[in-house]
Image (cartoon, grey):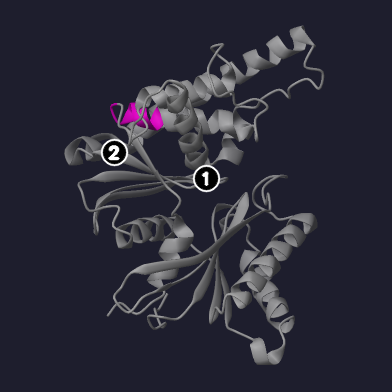
Amino acid sequence: MSTSHRRGEILAVVDMGTNVFGLAVGTLSQTGSPHWIQRAEREVSLASEGFGFLTEAGQKRAEAALQHHLQIALDQGATAFYGFGTAALRQWNQASEWLHRTASTLLSNIPQQKQIPINLAVISGEQEAEWIRYGLQQSGLLDDGPVLINDIGGGSVELVLCHGPKTYLALSLPLGMRKLLHQFPLRKMPKDPQDVPALADNLTSYQVAFQQCYDFLLQEFQQQLGQTLSQTQALRILGTAGPYRTLEQWTRVYLSEKKQASAMISRDHCAAFGDAATMRLQGIDPPLHPLSTDAVVHASALMLALSDACGGLPIQTTELSMREGALLALFHQD
């Protein structure tokens, strides 16, 4: 995609993900520094009924999210609005036609004197991974040695092994949370918390799903990263947004209760998060139940498997992800 915007323009970008449509409104200053004005998220659950298609209800949820984000963009003075579809839309063969119609509808809903360009498109997994890396590089998070970037989505997982602008390995794998939930299903928790037999049975389901998911992902990551990882000697995993935000928030409270502090999330902290998600061990504080989403179990297994596949690398988290990188890539690189 050509970069036609001048520094100082306010742009809006939506990451049209499988579970969430995430908005970033921002600009690039004349000195080349990113400035973020507003972020917003709307849950859309595009793959709640499966991959390869989008139901009418799913389309309506997506269109409502885009309309919501467009209004925010207009209120913040954006001069252009972009939306980039990822895993769920990549697997739907009618996505391009639907996005074209949706863009026309969005534009027609804006008074003529306030209209701005609206561009909606599906991007490849490779482009998604590169924009994640680019945004983190432009924000100064890749300057101090090789890192392994990991972005966990609903339909895919991106892994980028890099040092600054140099990329050693970039992968987009079909291992998103929706797919893992289908592959390693969970039983629903009983509505009655006093139903001890049902509760115990379901907790066993959580623990079994966690272990099976962990074993599967550990082997997958070892095969995919293998020799490249050992040659580059990454210093840390850099986890972007999504489940990593939950891990970071939980770890902060967990460490404060133990009267400890750490700039990084260790492998053992990640394991404790998994124990809290599955209630494998009693007395893990803070508790994670009731879970905000069943995907926390699979996300905790994924993050621990990745750390172990990398020899126990510590984890650093950031709220930045693909949407910020895409926005910055839209500017002229003077």
Image position, residue 272 (x, y; %): 46, 21
Q: What element carries label 1?
A: helix
Judged from this view, the residue extending furthest toward the left is 231
In the picture, residue 159 is in which quadrant? top left
Residue carrying label 1: 242
Report the magenta stretch's main SS.
helix
Judged from this view, the residue extending furthest toward the bottom is 113
Q: Distance between the residues labelled 2 and 1?
A: 18 Å
- Badge 1, how many Cα within 10 Å: few under 14, some, many 20+? some
Image position, residue 279 (x, y; %): 58, 17
Q: Residue 197, relative to residue 316: is it above or below?
A: above
Judged from this view, the residue extending furthest toward the right is 192
Q: Residue at x 59, y 84 (%)?
A: 116
In the picture, residue 312 is in which quadrant? top left
Which amino acid, by three-letter code, is at mark 2?
Arg
Q: What stretch is highlighted in magenta?
A: 305-311
Q: Residue at x 56, y 11 (%)?
A: 282
Q: In which quarter of the image is the C terminus?
A: bottom left
Q: Residue 197, relative to residue 318: is it above or below?
A: above
Q: Which residue is drawn at 24% across and 56% down?
A: 164
Which amino acid, by three-letter code, is at mark 1?
Gly
Q: Is 307 one of the magenta-colored residues?
A: yes
Give the label on residue 11, or none: none
- Badge 2, how many Cα within 10 Å: few under 14, some, many 20+? many
